[in-house]
Image: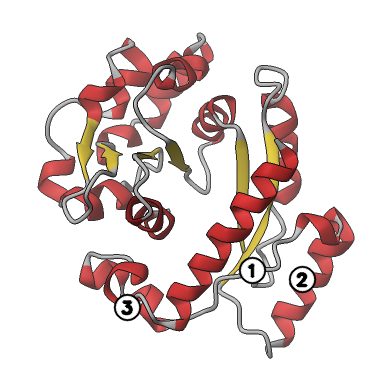
Amino acid sequence: ALNLCTLLDRAGQRVLLVDLDPQGSSSALGLGQEAADQGQSLVEVLTDGKPLRRACRRIKWLKHAQVTCSGERLGRVQALQADLVAGGQLALRDALKGGPWDTVIIDCPPVAAHLIKVALVAADHVLIPCPMTGASTRGLGALMRSISAAQRLNSDLRIAGVLPTMVRPRRKAAKTVMKQLVDALGADSIFDAYVREDSSVDDLDLRGRPVVFYRSNDGAAQDYKDVLAELNERMGAVA
């Protein structure tokens, strides 16, 4: 998410990165852990109806892009879930209305179905990252059911496609997973672009910057540029 956010910021767009992952990696990397834990967070937006702008901070190494303060407070999943069941699943969609951003990217957790539904109800398009490992396709059925359920509240929601990640083309496992994806979803649903398995991507946590920021000519950085180009094409096609 931070890589795409960085590319859009460099293109002059006003971007908001909504960090819905309780691990809070996007907000921690974008703001620094201490800053991410201070002030109003996304929890107050979702449960108390507080203004979203108060939970947003400019990413310290980008010109315009902002990220929401999330982190550990969003990890109160049980307490948060009770509030969301009461109707808070619409809170993010409502909070985003009339915002000043050109593009909003919602970074979702791999689990916590109620937070994923919050994102789906607020989104226009879904990009589904899928690691090319043996167990990566097991949750796709549940995700597709969640998307169908969210479309009852958000009729504008469309699937942009499935993005292969952690790709090592010569590995047998990658070819097997790709075949499973094509058989289950159809070839048109799978991105031609992909993100390779690369140590420079893994270095993000160590450097505190995405690969497109500190190694813009790297092969992995080009992967994200290709992803963004295809994503823009697909969003236009499915709008």
Q: CA distance from mark 1 to mark 2?
A: 13 Å
Name the quadrant containing residue 173. bottom right
In percent of the image, x 23 and y 53: which residue is there?
Answer: 62
Q: The disc labelled 3 sits on which kind of residue?
A: Arg
**Residue 193: assigned label:** 1
Give the x, y percent position of residue 140: 71, 50
Q: CA distance from mark 1 to mark 3?
A: 19 Å
Q: Which is nearer the N-term, disc 1 or disc 2? A: 2
Q: Nearer the viewer, mark 3 or mark 2?
A: 3
Q: The disc labelled 2 sits on which kind of residue?
A: Met
| Residue 3, above or below 107 | below
In percent of the image, x 70 and y 62: which residue is there?
Answer: 191
Q: The disc labelled 1 sits on which kind of residue?
A: Ala
| Residue 56, above or below 49 | below
Q: In the picture provided, is 111 more to the left or to the right than 213? A: right
In front of the other: 213 or 73 = 213
Q: In the picture provided, is 54 more to the left or to the right than 192? A: left
Label pair 1/2, CB-CB below 8 angstroms? no
Residue picked out by circle 2 = 178
In front of the other: 196 or 108 = 196
Q: Which is nearer the N-term, disc 3 or disc 2? A: 2
Crowd band around label 1 with a 10 angstrom C-alpha radius: few (<14), some (14–19), many (20+):
many
Question: Do we see residue 14 in this rendering?
Answer: yes
Label pair 1/3, CB-CB below 8 angstroms? no
Residue picked out by circle 3 = 215
